[in-house]
Image (cartoon, rainbow, N blue to C red):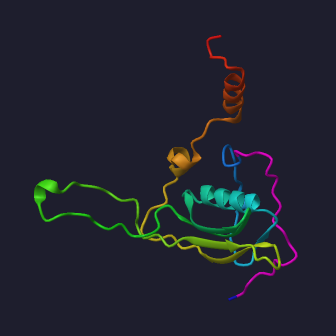
Amino acid sequence: MNIPAFENEFVNYDISDRNEHQNVEFKDQEKLEIVFGLIFKTWEQLDRHIRMYTKQNSFVSIITCFESDDITRRRYRYACKHQGIGHSKKTAILENQKQAYTKRLGCKWLVNASCPKKTKKIKINSCYLEYCNHKIHPDTINFALYYQQFPNEVKQEIKYYTSKGLSMQT
């Protein structure tokens, strides 16, 4: 396996826009990748990279595990929201059963990242980028709750009105 050398390269994104996953257009030449050994300057850059990658590939990731000491993040694990296997809770009594569906479909997409105390570099330690047992639907970007947020203009108006104690009618 050929591992790219990223030791002296940092992925650099402008993270001034906190709603970076909205209104992001991707071109063919801007195809994002997640590879072992990729280094980031900040956790926000890594979060943004993962969000943009998952949006580009029409699925949603979640943080399934993290470790921190005091105020410093040390390790994060990102996984597909369809990771894991759903277990039935059916009872033997038919009247007590209900039909429930699970979003846990056994997808194994996974990215582990850490920031060791010695190097203080945020690095992707391992990644498993295979999608399993579920269709990646292109409408995920439009309908996933993860991507549904108020635009910045609306957030600013809400902040203004709540800080001044005003209502929208005044």
73 lies left or right of 14: left
Relative to the observer, which residue lies in front, 4 or 138? 4
51 magenta-colored: no
Can you tell which quarter of the image residue 102 is in? bottom left
Q: Please, is residue 87 above or below residue 170 in the view?
A: below
Instruction: Decide if residue 54 is in sight here.
Output: yes
The prevailing secondary structure element of the residues shown in magenta is: loop
11 magenta-colored: yes
In which quadrant of the rendered image does the N terminus lie? bottom right
Kindly identify the residue that appears in the image at 11 percent across and 61 percent down: 93
Magenta-colored span: 2-19
Kindly identify the residue that appears in the image at 62 percent across and 67 percent down: 66
96 lies left or right of 4: left
Kindly identify the residue that appears in the image at 60 percent across and 40 percent down: 149
Kindly identify the residue that appears in the image at 70 percent across and 53 percent down: 26
Relative to the observer, which residue lies in front, 87 or 12? 87
In which quadrant of the rendered image does the C terminus lie? top right
Can you tell which quarter of the image residue 117 is in? bottom right
Q: Where's residue 82, x and y in %?
A: 46, 63
Residue positioned most to the bottom: 1
Q: Where's residue 122, x and y in %?
A: 76, 71
Q: Please, is residue 125 above or below residue 167 in the view?
A: below
Instruction: Decide if residue 28 is in sight here.
Output: no
Number of marks in picture: 0
